[in-house]
Amino acid sequence: MTDAGRARFLKGHGTENDFVVLPDPDGSVWPEGRLSPAMVRRLCGRREGIGGDGVLRIVPSRYVPDAAAVLGADLERCAWFMDHRNADGSTAEMCGNGIRLFLYALVTEGLLDRAACEAGVLVGTRGGPRWVGATPDGEYWVDMGPARAFGEGKAVVSGQVFQGLAVSMGNPHLACLTDVDVDTLDLGGQPEFDPGLFPDGVNVELINTLPAGDADAHIRLRVHERGVGETRSCGTGACAAAYAALAAAGRDTGTVVVDVPGGRLSVRFEQGTTVLTGPAVIVATGVLGQEWPGS
Amino acid sequence: MTDAGRARFLKGHGTENDFVVLPDPDGSVWPEGRLSPAMVRRLCGRREGIGGDGVLRIVPSRYVPDAAAVLGADLERCAWFMDHRNADGSTAEMCGNGIRLFLYALVTEGLLDRAACEAGVLVGTRGGPRWVGATPDGEYWVDMGPARAFGEGKAVVSGQVFQGLAVSMGNPHLACLTDVDVDTLDLGGQPEFDPGLFPDGVNVELINTLPAGDADAHIRLRVHERGVGETRSCGTGACAAAYAALAAAGRDTGTVVVDVPGGRLSVRFEQGTTVLTGPAVIVATGVLGQEWPGS
C-alpha cells in the first residue's frame, strides 16, 4: 500500500479526552466539503472509523471562513486555528484537554518550533483566541480565562444531596466538595439541579479533598458533563472544582492538583486568569486507509 | 517526528467488528514480553489507545510457541499465524470477521501476493488451520467448518419468547427465526435460555427473513454474543442463522445473504463446509506514538 496522497492523521488524548487530529497546513487537505458532518461522524466512529470524542483540524486561521468573526483583531496574531468538531459532526468552541493535544501535534508535525511553544503562543478557536504553551517537562498549558462564582446550589446524584458552588468558566458548573468517597457514586443518571440557578443546564463536579502536599490544594474529581454524562476528564470542570476548593479555604489564587479519572491536571489561579496544565499523548500517527473517500 | 523504529499498525474492521492489526513479519517486533495482556488492553482502549475489539498480530507460524500444538502436521503449510487477542488481553481462537481483515492486511502489507490470496491460503489460528481467500471483487472468505444442529430451544428476549434451532459452529448458538421486526427489540439484557441445552451459555440470533432475490435466502440478523452483549456482527452467528434459514426451507446447501447491523455478509453451505464471505476495511495505517513503551 502506498501512502502517497492519503490524508495524514494523529490520534491522541488529553487525560483520556481523545481526538482525531487532522493536519491541514495549507487548508487544501480538508476543505469544508470534505470535512462534512458525516465525515466527522465516521472519523469519530469507534468501530467504523478511527474513534474519538471529536476532531481537531490544524489549519491556518486565515483559511477558516468564520475565524475573523471570532478572533477579530487577533486574527493576524493567531497563526493556527483549532477547527474543533464534536463527534456528532457539529462545530465546537474550546476544549481545555483538546487544545493541549492540538499544541503537541503542532510541534510533532513540525508546524511550530518547540522553543516558541515554550514561550507561549496565541491559538485561534471558535471560543476566541487562547494563550497556550508547553512546560519544560513536556506538559501543555492553556489560559482558560477567569472563573466566576455566581451562587450556591445543590444537586441530587445517586440519591444523595450535594451542596456546591455555582461557578462559570464560560459554561456553568456546580462544584460540590463532599466527604462522601466520590468513587462510590453512581453517575449513570442525570443529576437533579435547580433550573432557576442553571437555566441552560449544568456540569456537576463531585470533589474529594486530598492532602495538599506541595500544592495549595489537591482534589479528586468525578464529573457529569451537561448533555454527555460522566466523562474521563473535563477541562472547565477541573478549573471550576479547583476554584471551589480554593474558595473553601478562603483563597482565590494558588495552584490546585486535580486528579480526574483520566489522569492528573493542575490549575493555577492568578490575577483573574485560570491556567490549566496537563499531559497530551499522541497514541498513533498515520494515514487514512484507501476506503476513505478522497484519500 | 520520525517514524524510525516505531511499531507499525493497521486499524480496520470486518462488518464493524474492529481490530488493531500488528504486523510482525519476523517475530521480533512484538515478542511475548512486549505484547503482554496489559499492552493488549492499552492498544484496545478506545480513549487511551487505538481502540478495537481485539488485536490481530501477523506473525509466521514458526515463531509462535503454541502453534505446533494447534496446527499439528499443518504447521509447515501455514506460513502465517493469526495471533488473536481479546480486548481484555486474553488469547482468542478464531474470528470470522477478524480473519478477513487479517488477510486483507497481509496483502496490503506486501506479505502475501494478491493472486495467491485469490487462490486461497491456509492460515494458522488458535482454533486450528483455516482456509481463507479473496474474491475477485475485493471481499474475503473463510471456511468456518461444518454447522451442526443439535436440537430446538427457546430464548426470552425483551420479554418475548422466541423459538430457535440449536446450532453448533464450534461454539453454541440459538438461531431464532421470527416475524417480530428484530429492529424493535431491546437486546440490552441477558436472554433467558435452557441451561440443559446450553450448559456453557449460548449466542442468540434473532432473525427476520427477507425476499431472497438471487440468493437461496436473505435474512436480517441481530445477535447477542455470549459474555459480551449485542454486537455489530458475529461471524459464527451469521453462519448459524443462515443455517437455520436454509433448514426452515428444508435445505442444507445453498447461499444465504446475511444483513447484520455492521454490514452485509454471505454464507455458502456446501458438502459439510460453511464459507463466510464479507468485506474487510482498513481504516488507517501508521505507527505508534513515542509514548508507547519500546516504540
Image (cartoon, coloured by chain):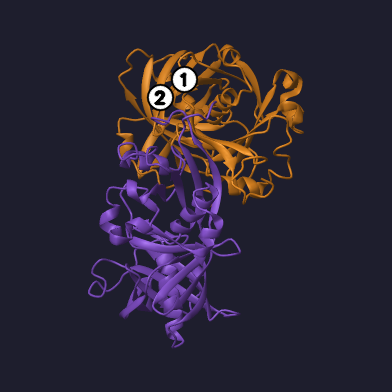
Chain colours: A orange, B purple
Task: Tell me the SS state at disc 2.
Answer: strand
The residue at the point 36 percent across, 73 percent down is B174
Q: Position of residue B62 (x, y in %)?
A: 33, 49
The furthest residue to the bottom? B250
- Check disc 2 and report the residue beneath it: A258
Q: Position of residue A240 (x, y in %)?
A: 48, 26
- Which chain is indicated by disc 2? A
Q: Which of the two residues, B188 or A273, is positioned nearer the viewer here? A: B188
The amino acid type of the residue labelled 1 equals: Val
Q: Quadrant of the N terminus of chain A?
A: top right
Q: Which of the two residues, A53 or B171, is positioned nearer the viewer here? A: B171
- Check disc 1 and report the residue beneath it: A267
**Label 2 environment density (alpha carbons within 10 Å; few <14, some 14–19, many ≥20):** many
Q: Quadrant of the C terminus of chain A?
A: top right
Say above or below: A11 vs A110: below
In the picture, residue B294 is in which quadrant? Answer: top left
Say above or below: B292 vs B166: above
Report whether residue A200 is seen.
no
Q: Earlier in the sequence, mark 2 or mark 1?
A: 2
Task: Tell me the SS state at disc 1.
Answer: strand
Q: Position of residue A19 (x, y in %)?
A: 54, 37
The furthest residue to the front? B76
Q: Position of residue A145 (x, y in %)?
A: 58, 21
